[in-house]
Amino acid sequence: MFKFEGFKGFKPISFLLLVLVLSLSVVVSADDQDAFIGVNIGTDLSDMPHPTQVVALLRSQQIRHIRLYDADRGMLVALANTGIKVAITVPNEQLLGIGQSNSTAAHWVSQNIVAHYPATNITTVCVGNEVFNSLPNAAPVLINALKYIHNALVSSNLDRQIKVSTPIASTVILDSFPPSQAFFNHSLNPVLGPLLKFLQSTGSSFMLNVYPYYDYMKSNGVIPLDYALFNPLPANKEAVDSNTLLHYTNVFDAMVDAAYFAMSGLNVTNVPVLVTESGWPSKGDANEPDATMDNANTYNSNLIKHVINQTGTPKHPGIAVSTYIYELYNEDTKPGSVSEKNWGLFDANGKPIYTLQLTNSGRTFSNDTANQTHCTAKEGADTKMLQAALDWACGPGKVNCSALLQGQACYEPDNVAAHATFAFDSYYHMMGKGDGTCDFNGVAMLTTTDPSHGSCQFIGSDGMNGTFLNGSIADFNSTSSSSWRARGGYAGGGLLIKVLLALLLS
């Protein structure tokens, strides 16, 4: 039996998540098997940005993997020579024609791939999307469509560079809890069996759309919110698969492992899972109280860290599951509930919906597109911790704190939190807003609200970036107010990551 025991309710994030999204860096390596985070790009917007604007946003955010729901020529042209890896899609409405004609498939590949490759770095073809759910009458020709597209790639000598698969909704997996008991809907096995053999023979991935939000909503309280959001859980509160004794700390891993177990039920054990959609809505109807910016931030931030840190799943630890976040833009014209329109990281103007919190995420660092972020003392932070962090910033951290002296512009209000905010923000801007430079052992937070007041003007309030100061980074730890240890290369690490990534992407 799969049990949830002793879960506590969700502890809300103590600060408002507003309008900055941090960059979605990927693991950059010659090895194509490295994990990556990508982004889906839907087009149900009343004012869809021009392809060149979309690409400009992708490049500014250093998003290196995207998935299109079609093969729009304008987007493929705009993506040329960017190096961005692109998954294109055979739309469901074209599936029947391609699945019944090898020549139609060859023409599609010629028009939508050969005409753009290699200038546009097309790596994947998604044949349809959730066909079993959205277009079940096309299911009988799905395998033919996959094979015909692949045959056309073989004829163009592109089959090694470009893989072919089809995204499948996780709802086709039944009895998914516990994962070890999961199996595919038996009525689909006549198609899923040959599909898995095709993926196996071509070295392609099993594409799965995973939405813990919907699993949580449908569970009527059985699935705790923390478990859906990847929030840390004590070991005695994890979900345990009694058949395998594997411990699960989040819905995402459980669903991915359910897919692995379901595939093994059809005697396929060596096809990797690629998650083609996952995310969390930032706004919903009255009956969707957990569709909030805080929860969307928490889910997507934790998902990114989970993937790029190559955590893997309990069944396959250390084997990360590359994932495309759903989605780049809020789609205001998409039919359905309010939540259906609010899965995006950005609005149509390229303005971030909320701030992704990616501190200590390894290979991910911030990219401030609005130049409006500040670092402040976290609400409710321990006063002694704040004082110790303030002492470090104004001492070894080399922040000029003279404005905090009695009689100076930033002396009032005379309390530790206000003074720490000045020091934290000064350090954050001084270090170029690098990854990890607004943490201070967990007592600092990012905000888009300028903390300047009266004659006390903070370093970033005039829109100017801080300047990185030469010199050694002092020790920074949680036990001494005079000698704090920089966790993970507190300031220098963020700069080093930027330099290395710039070199790798050049």
Image: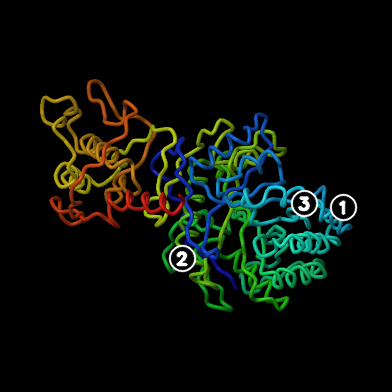
Sequence order check: which comes first, mark 3 or mark 2? 3
Task: Point out the tag, 1 or 3, that comes first from the N-terminus.
Answer: 1
Query: Residue 237's mark?
Result: 2
On the picture, is 128 further left or further right than 401?
right
Nearest-to-viewer mark from 1 and 3: 3
Q: Nearer the viewer, residue 189 or 143?
A: 143
Q: Is residue 307 above or below residue 3?
A: above
Q: CA distance from mark 1 to mark 3?
A: 16 Å
Task: State if disc 3 and disc 1 touch (CB < 8 Å).
Answer: no
**How many numbered callouts?**
3
Of residue 293 and residue 111, the one placed in the foreground of this image is 111
Task: For label 2, count other residues whose C-alpha is less than 10 Å away and answer few (under 14), some (14-19) or many (20+).
Answer: some
Give me the disc on residue 110.
3
Left or right, 338 with reference to 307: right
Residue at mark 1: 97
Name the kind of residue labelled 2 in the image.
Answer: Lys
Q: Farthest top residue? A: 454
In the structure shown, which secondary structural element does the residue marked by tag 1 occupy?
helix
User: Disc 1 or disc 2, which is closer to the eye?
Assistant: 1
- Could you tell me if residue 219 is visible in this image? no
Element at badge 3? helix
* Of marks 3 and 2, the one in the foreground: 3
Q: Quadrant of the N terminus?
A: bottom right
Marks 3/2: CA–CA distance: 53 Å
Q: Residue at x 70, y 76 (%)?
A: 265
Closer to the chain start, of discs 1 and 2, is: 1
- Label 1 to label 2: alpha-carbon separation: 50 Å
| Three-letter amino acid code at the position of disc 3 | Ser
